[in-house]
Amino acid sequence: MKQSTLAAAVSAVLLGTTVFVGSAQAAPRLCDDGSRPPCRDTGEETSTNNLSYPVIWSDGVSILTPLPETEWTFAPITDPASQCFMGDTGGLPVPEDAVCYYDIEAPVGDSPQVWWLQQREANKWQAFNPLATQSVAITGVDWGDDLESRDNFNTRSIIRTEVVLLKNVVDDPTSEFDAADFLAFEMSGAVPGTANSPVEMHGTNYGGPVNPTLGTQTLIDPTLVRPGFQATMYSACARFIIQKVVGDPASLQWNPADGHWGPISAVNNPVFNGAIYPDALADDYSAEINVSGSLIYGYNWNLRKVGEGAGLYRLTYVLDGGGDVGGTCTTALTTAFTPEPANPETEAPATQVVNVVTNPVATPAIVPAGDPALNGDLGGGLSYIDVVINVKTGGGGNK
């Protein structure tokens, strides 16, 4: 790891107002669990990141307390040059008492832009997040870029695994939702000096009525953020599995009784098997609102603790059926990966893998609900990706 000079952020107090100034560069830092960024959000961060991109709650479960527009709050800003952080943090956190970031280097229109920051008590907002009352078909599944693009994972790596479920309500004739209701908050991207670090920080330019001049008071079309999609999705019946493949990957078969791939001659029992819902499994899996304001499923895979040496591993995101169909999920499953429709005018489109990186070293796959390859599993189908883990050779570090 390269070392760089660590300098503290400078703050000056003038007439009782804190002026925030950027600092010199700081040494890169690891996440709390020892991994390199991007870091998994903690439970505390999940509670303080505002939802900026719409999400549809399926399976009758929401993990957010509704926050109506009348309860949105934004810090009143009259002099952004003195009230907001400016410049580059140099790898340090944005000062906690800075409620906004003032971007004078990349103005929007004719004026420098004010961005009201996440994780601040003064700033509370929430994008549209309806609770579905009908079954919801998944339009797209987006796996994290690292898993698709990197071929240098090794037995000492800590790998951030992310899965995002996406919905296009316009192209789905079975959708109960009106696309016009789905609006997103425009977000800043990472404050300079915080990108890809444990202290990454984003903000919105919305500002609210208390900032009629500096705030936009405008929500945007979510397809400008994620082309082709109006929302992410949350299923309360999700489970994540990691297994080492010891035979021909083409010979693997889904075993609905065990809830993972077999046979044992071709693939080992899971080294990780964690569900979103309450269960008897030892492993924990979670969904969270990240600092950009989107809901994602995530797990930090520490190969030094959770692994069986070098080789090929299959990572599987599966939707388990509820008790009504003999499944293990604690609620009735109403979410599914969908096959090619027999009648596109009345049926949901097939779920697609989206946002695959250019020249991927690993490409995710989908097995939709009801597919013969599920061998009678009555859940909502699954998506998986096969990832190669190499032997760690020489040197130190955590790559």
Image: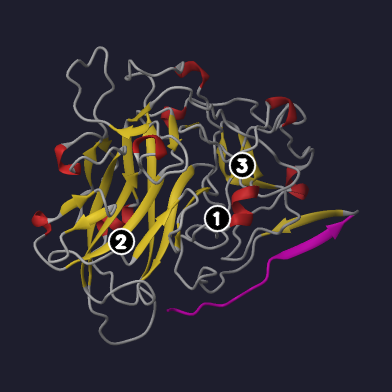
The answer for how far apart the CA atoms under marks 1 and 2 are is 35 Å
Which one is in front in this view, the residue at disc 3 or the one at disc 1? Answer: 3
Residue 66 place in picture, x, y as percent: 65, 32
Amino acid identity at mark 3: Asn
Q: Is residue 381 left or right of residue 127?
A: left
Task: Identify the mark nearer the N-term, 2 or 3.
Answer: 3
Counting other residues with Cα less than 10 Å from the Cα at mark 1, is it few (<14), some (14-19), or many (20 or more)?
Answer: some
| Highlighted range, magenta | 1-14
Is 246 above or below relative to 56? below
Which SS class for mark 3?
Answer: loop
12 w.r.t. 138: above or below: below
Q: In the depicted view, which residue is nearer to us: 297 or 181?
A: 297
Tell me the tag on residue 50.
3
Question: Amino acid type of disc 1?
Answer: Pro
> The residue tagged with tag 2: helix, strand or loop?
strand
| Color style of the picture | secondary structure
What residue is pinned by disc 2?
A: 242
Is residue 256 highlighted in magenta? no
Residue 379: x and y, percent? 31, 39
Residue indicated by mark 1: 192
Alpha carbons under labels 3 and 1: distance apart: 20 Å
